Image: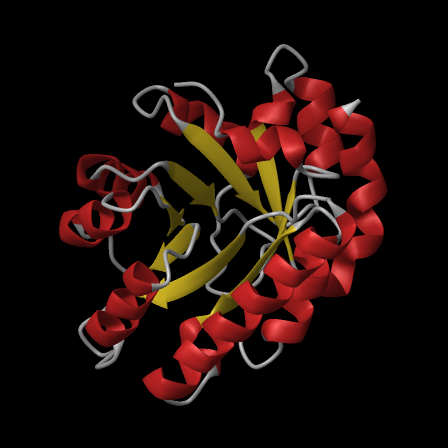
Amino acid sequence: MSKPQFINELSIPAVAAPMFLISGPELVIECCKNGIVGTFPALNQRTSEGFEEWLIQIKTELDAFEKETGKKAAPFGVNLIVHNTNPRVQADLMLCVKHKVPIIITSLGAVSQLVDAVHSYGGLVYHDVIKKRHAEKAAEAGVDGLILVAAGAGGHGGTLHPIPFIAEVKKFFKKQFYFQDAYLMEEISLQQNKWELTWLIWVLDLLILKRVRLMMLIKK
């Protein structure tokens, strides 16, 4: 599968991770203006009505930026918690469809109906996984890419070392790989230099963005 077009237009191959209570419209907008995919959790806004206000704000300001500068902003994304304990998931999904959110990151559940809804308007779905079985289920649901959450990552961190994790998933998943956090990037680049590392997008907590210099080297 070829890389999504937006990857070639990023300043560096990076996604600003959707951080609970931290990521919001201002952070997302500035990331996108500077060529990094900005994302935020839908649940950072305490109501679906407020969530829609954030979507409108982000779209409006990025549209204005593109008109004023002639530059194309990076796409933005929303993290949806796809679990039966989240009573808002359906309402928030419908708002994402309504506003055609370019990228949806799903956590705690890979659901084919959600993937189909996002694909209906041309959006992309990437799913968090911490083990092989999660990756298999996401692949069955038809996601466009996997975010491999290995040991050392933030959020619901995994326990697997990234190199064997990626190698195992590559056996059955031939689409896009993302990688949560950047702790072992240099090790991966040294041991797996035969891979096309620019096919990986690194999902970063902005608290560790000092590591982006490594990504710029990898992209070159």
Quarter residue 95 falls in: bottom left
Say left or right for 73 vs 86.
Answer: right
Query: Compared with residue 164, is residue 128 higher up or lower down, i.e. above or below?
Result: below
Q: Position of residue 121 (x, y in %)?
A: 29, 46
- Residue at the spot 63% in from the left edge and 28% down from the top edge: 8
Say left or right for 85 vs 100.
Answer: left
Say left or right for 99 vs 76.
Answer: left
- Residue at the spot 60% in from the left edge and 58% down from the top edge: 63
Check the image and name the residue furthest to the bottom: 46
Q: Position of residue 9 (x, y in %)?
A: 65, 33
Q: Is residue 37 visible?
A: yes
- Residue at the spot 36% in from the left edge and 86% down from the top edge: 49
Check the image and name the residue furthest to the front: 67
Check the image and name the residue furthest to the left: 113
Say left or right for 109 vs 27.
Answer: left
- Residue at the spot 48% in from the left edge and 30% down from the top edge: 4
Compare residues 188 and 9 and report the one nearer the observer: 9
Compare residues 133 and 218 and report the one nearer the observer: 218
Number of numbered tags placed on the structure image: 0
Scheme of colours in the image: secondary structure
User: Which quadrant: the N terminus?
Assistant: top left
Q: Is residue 82 visible?
A: no
Q: Position of residue 158 (x, y in %)?
A: 47, 53
User: Which quadrant: the C terminus?
Assistant: top right
Q: Position of residue 81 (x, y in %)?
A: 33, 68
